[in-house]
Image (tube, grey):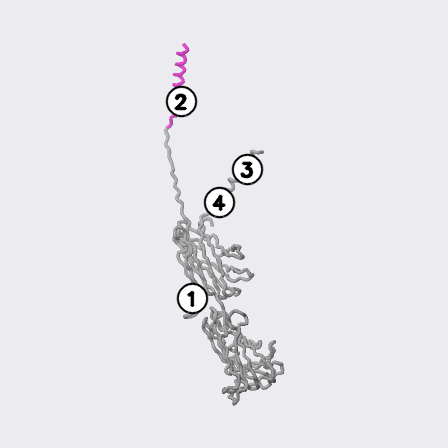
């Protein structure tokens, strides 16, 4: 008696479950989107560099200027120039030119330019805004010895500080020896220019 | 209470990470190292000599010099180193028949930089009319071209134009308008002297009639050398 009722109960339960499954069966299709983001690259390099020093008079070249590559990144691109001015004197000035080429894939803009130098073994850092003379007192005697002027001398795309991939701007750094420079002295400083992705400058 | 504290830390970390995301900016840095080595303006009197540098008796007789112009009181200016008059004129001279006076010239490094910057001339047993030639050679021993811009004679500054106009410089030690010595300057001024090069000039010195016996008169001539590009003569030809 009990066995018969139990079998019937199980049977009824199975029938109910089957009817529910039928109710849940629904036709469907799934769409997917695969997303691959290949990022670009912000990359700039010095591609050409020169200076405008000339002979003081025919046959007499008093001050000599050397511009050469000093450091490269892991891809072999020049990221640092070394400028040496020998036998300079008050009032002497020379311009150093460098092509800043965008060899990456993202437009860049000049984010900042900074002058770094050392006074009494302490590193100093001054901003170097474009188109502005900046005085440097490198021997810490409260009188400027050198002043420098940074500008874009050739804006190839006429877009200001922006450099598009494949393009370049020519930056000009003018170095002027002031009256308070002393004889037989070495003055050293470093210019650091940071170029960042265009849309965040 | 403790639960609140526990909640603060993750919220703070989330805030920090969101700021970091905002600051993340791709950038590249280019650099230029600049070294400026300055040169040196340095001139030296490499040679100073007089034509009568052997004590008498010699077979070389003295010379007698007479200026053909004479200053008046209005020509003199007090400079702190005596009274100085600069006028136009020349010196007539003749060879005498005796060797009485003589002179010597030498150079010294007075500032200790290794170069002789001062020339001295000393006339021994001088007398009114005695004349001697002083020759100087000034070399550029620095690394920058120079001009000699000025002579400063006993405190009086003279340019090339002034020397060409008037080159007789009378020195009156006691301010009575009666000069005791005279120097006739010739030009070292206004010509560029490149490193390693030099210029030579010859000047005349005359003991004048008002000079006293057993006295010493000092003529000081300074040559002011200036880096070429800031010389008053730069660009003038």
Mark 1 vs 3: CB contact within 8 A: no
Q: Residues within 10 Å of mark 2 (few under 14, many from 20)?
A: few
Question: Regarding mark 4 in the picture, which secondary structure is present there?
Answer: helix
10 Å neighbourhood of mark 4: few (<14), some, or many (≥20)?
few
Q: Chain of mark 3?
A: B
Q: Which residue is mark 3?
A: B8
Q: Nearer the viewer, mark 4 or mark 3?
A: 3
- Work out whether residue A157 can be spotted: no
Q: Earlier in the sequence, mark 2 or mark 1?
A: 2
Asked which secondary structure carries label 1, the reply is loop
Q: State which region is magenta.
A: A1-26
The chain carrying label 4 is B
Q: Where does label 1 land, which residue?
A: A54
> Is disc 4 in the same subunit as disc 3?
yes
Q: Is residue B95 above or below residue A35?
A: below
Residue A11 sits inside the magenta stretch = yes
From the viewer's side, name the closer residue of B235 and B121. Answer: B121
Q: CA distance from mark 3 to mark 2?
A: 48 Å
The x and y percentages for residue A73 are 41, 52
User: How far apart in space, not on screen, are marks 4 and 1 (Cα)?
Assistant: 48 Å
Q: Position of residue B63 (x, y in %)?
A: 52, 86
Q: Residue B70 at what x, y percent from top left?
A: 57, 85
Which residue matches tag 4? B22
Q: Tell me which residue sits at (54%, 57%) in the image.
A: A120
Q: Position of residue B69 (x, y in %)?
A: 55, 85
Q: Chain of mark 1?
A: A
Q: Secondary structure at mark 2?
A: helix
Of circles 2 and 1, which is in front?
A: 1
The residue that mark 2 highlights is A20
């Amino acid at each position: 008696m009990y066995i018969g009722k139990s079998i019937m109960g199980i049977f009824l339960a199975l029938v109910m479950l089957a009817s529910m499954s039928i109710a849940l069966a629904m036709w469907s299709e799934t769409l997917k989107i695969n997303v691959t983001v290949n990022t670009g690259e912000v990359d700039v390099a010095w591609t050409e560099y020169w200076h405008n020093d000339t002979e003081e008079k025919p046959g007499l070249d008093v001050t000599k200027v050397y511009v050469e590559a000093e450091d490269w990144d892991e891809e072999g691109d020049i990221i640092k120039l070394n400028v040496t001015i020998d036998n300079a004197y008050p009032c002497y000035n020379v311009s150093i030119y460098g092509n800043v080429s965008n060899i990456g894939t993202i437009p860049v803009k000049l984010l900042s330019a900074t002058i770094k130098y050392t006074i009494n073994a302490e590193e100093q850092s001054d901003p170097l805004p474009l188109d502005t003379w900046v005085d440097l007192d490198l021997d810490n005697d409260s009188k400027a010895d050198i002043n420098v002027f940074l500008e874009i001398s050739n804006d190839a795309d006429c877009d200001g500080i922006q450099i598009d991939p494949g393009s370049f701007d020519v930056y000009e750094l003018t170095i002027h020896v002031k009256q308070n420079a002393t004889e037989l002295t070495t003055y050293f400083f470093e210019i650091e220019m940071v170029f960042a992705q265009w849309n965040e400058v | 209470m403790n639960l609140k504290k526990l909640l603060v830390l993750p919220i703070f970390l989330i805030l920090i990470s969101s700021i970091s995301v905002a600051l993340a900016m791709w950038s590249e840095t280019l650099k230029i190292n600049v070294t400026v080595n300055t040169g040196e303006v340095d001139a030296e009197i490499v040679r100073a000599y007089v034509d009568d540098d052997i004590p008498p008796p010699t077979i070389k007789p003295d010379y007698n010099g007479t200026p053909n112009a004479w200053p008046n009181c209005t020509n003199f200016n007090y400079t702190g180193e005596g009274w100085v008059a600069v006028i136009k004129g020349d010196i007539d001279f003749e060879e005498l028949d005796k060797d009485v006076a003589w002179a010597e010239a030498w150079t010294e490094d007075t500032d200790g930089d290794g170069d002789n910057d001062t020339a001295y001339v000393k006339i021994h047993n001088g007398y009114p009319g005695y004349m001697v030639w002083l020759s100087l050679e000034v070399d550029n021993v620095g690394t920058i071209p120079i001009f000699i811009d000025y002579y400063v004679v006993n405190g009086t500054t003279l340019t090339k134009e002034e020397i060409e106009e008037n080159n007789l410089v009378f020195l009156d030690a006691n301010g009575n308008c009666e000069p005791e010595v005279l120097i006739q300057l010739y030009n070292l001024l206004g010509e560029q002297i490149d490193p390693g090069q030099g210029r030579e000039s010859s000047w005349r010195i005359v003991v004048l009639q008002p000079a006293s016996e057993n006295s010493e008169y000092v003529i000081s001539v300074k040559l002011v050398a200036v880096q070429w590009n800031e010389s008053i003569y730069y660009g003038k030809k």
